[in-house]
């Protein structure tokens, strides 16, 4: 399997992407990586990677689409960027998947305009895996589409259902619609229009899910517009950081707390790992015609390696094919 990795994307590029590539190659002997970016910056970082060097192909991509420029214009004009080159190689089946920690907008624009959408999909969506105490749930969309239509949300359910089947191995994922109440008549115009359509969609729809139940294992796939999803995602990240900081502060406040902290340290370590985004890797961009994973902008090397592993699971799980089949079923039912 060959994964295309943007070596210039993210806050810690190119160090983190190169380290992530090396870690992933050492973990997966069947993996090959096309490492794209400025060669003079990448090559010195491979000095200690002789054991996996034969499975790395360097791709010269001197242009970088930054977060400060228009993503669409960047994809149109910077044809020598890793995002554009990688999406075109994925489209032409020269690689099996694409991973980047760079500009989210550029990855989305590249996926739509260079790679292309799955037939029938109106808007691709970003869908991170988030912890719920028992495992993970998929939040879709988390920011790619801040203004949505009801038909898009129905399609998000198809995409999320496909991902949880193909990557997480679930037989029948529970798909819920995020709303301010559990009753079908509650909510704004968008969710009221969406509810009856999701009832007739080709997946296991369980109804509305309130915000307080999001992390309570109420559903495996939670559907919302990108504006709400981004608020939920960042609020969860903030709460997790605040709670861990408060617990640490209280544990260090007196001798009794310090003793209890030493005893409970292994448990706290497990909780921290469960809440750590680096262990998941990134958010898949679902709805485009290929396996695309968007890693967190602040990813370290380990997070990049996990994003690569996640992208490999998308390929092995035939997620794109499952979404395509779901879209065909939806079209047949609507006809």
Image (cartoon, helix red, strand yellow):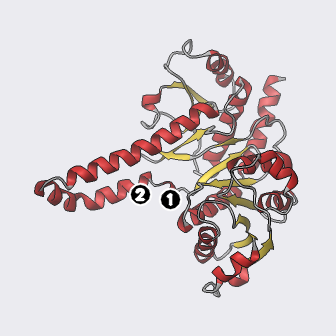
Q: Which mark is residue 279?
A: 1
Where residue 266 sits, quadrant-wise, is: bottom left
Residue at (77%, 41%) from the top-left corner? 325
Residue at (63, 75) in percent of width and height: 25
Badge 2 crowding class, 10 Å Cα cut-off, few under 14, some 14 to 19, many 20 or more, is few
Q: Could you tell me residue 113's position as x and y percent?
A: 85, 46
The spot of residue 264 in percent (x, y) is: 23, 58
Q: Residue at x 47, y 29 (%)?
A: 211
Q: Nearer the viewer, residue 40 or 191?
A: 40
Residue with the mark numbered 2: 273
Report crowding for label 1: few under 14, some 14 to 19, many 20 or more residues within 10 A (C-alpha). Answer: some
Q: Secondary structure at mark 2?
A: helix
Residue at the extreme front of the image, as rendered: 68
Q: Quadrant of residue 204?
A: top right
Find out whether the residues at labels 2 and 1 contact each other: C-beta distance under 8 Å: yes
Please state which of residues 282 and 43 is positioned toward the viewer in this rendering: 43
- Residue 323, image x, y percentages: 74, 42
Badge 1 element: helix
């Amino acid at each position: 399997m060959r994964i295309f990795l943007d070596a210039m994307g993210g806050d810690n590029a190119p160090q983190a992407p190169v380290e992530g590539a090396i870690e992933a190659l050492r973990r997966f002997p069947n993996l090959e990586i096309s490492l794209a970016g400025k060669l003079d910056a990448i090559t010195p970082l491979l000095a200690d990677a002789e054991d996996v060097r034969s499975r790395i192909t360097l791709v010269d991509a001197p242009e970088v689409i930054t977060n400060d420029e228009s993503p669409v214009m960047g994809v149109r004009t910077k044809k020598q960027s890793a995002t554009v080159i990688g999406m075109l190689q994925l489209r032409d089946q020269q690689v099996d998947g694409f991973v980047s920690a760079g500009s989210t907008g550029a990855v989305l624009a590249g996926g739509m305009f260079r790679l292309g959408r799955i037939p029938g999909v109106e808007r691709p969506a970003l869908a991170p895996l988030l912890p719920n105490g028992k495992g993970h749930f998929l939040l879709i969309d988390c920011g790619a589409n801040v203004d949505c239509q009801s038909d898009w949300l129905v399609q998000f359910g198809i995409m999320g259902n496909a991902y949880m089947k193909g990557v997480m191995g679930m037989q029948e994922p529970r798909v819920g619609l995020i709303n301010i109440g559990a009753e079908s008549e509650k909510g704004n115009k968008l969710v009221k229009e969406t509810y009856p359509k999701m009832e007739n969609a080709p997946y296991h729809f369980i109804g509305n899910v309130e915000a307080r139940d999001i992390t309570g294992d109420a559903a495996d796939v939670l559907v919302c517009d990108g504006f709400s999803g981004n608020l939920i995602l960042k609020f969860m990240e903030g709460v997790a950081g605040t709670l861990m900081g408060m617990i640490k502060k209280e544990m260090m406040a007196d001798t009794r707390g310090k003793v209890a902290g030493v005893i409970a340290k292994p448990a706290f370590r497990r909780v921290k790992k469960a809440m750590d985004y680096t262990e998941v890797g990134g958010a898949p961009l679902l709805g485009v015609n290929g396996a695309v994973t968007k890693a967190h902008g602040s990813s370290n090397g380990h997070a990049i390696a996990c994003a690569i592993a996640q992208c490999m699971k998308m390929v092995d799980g035939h997620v794109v094919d499952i979404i395509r089949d779901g879209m065909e079923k939806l079209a047949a039912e609507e006809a």
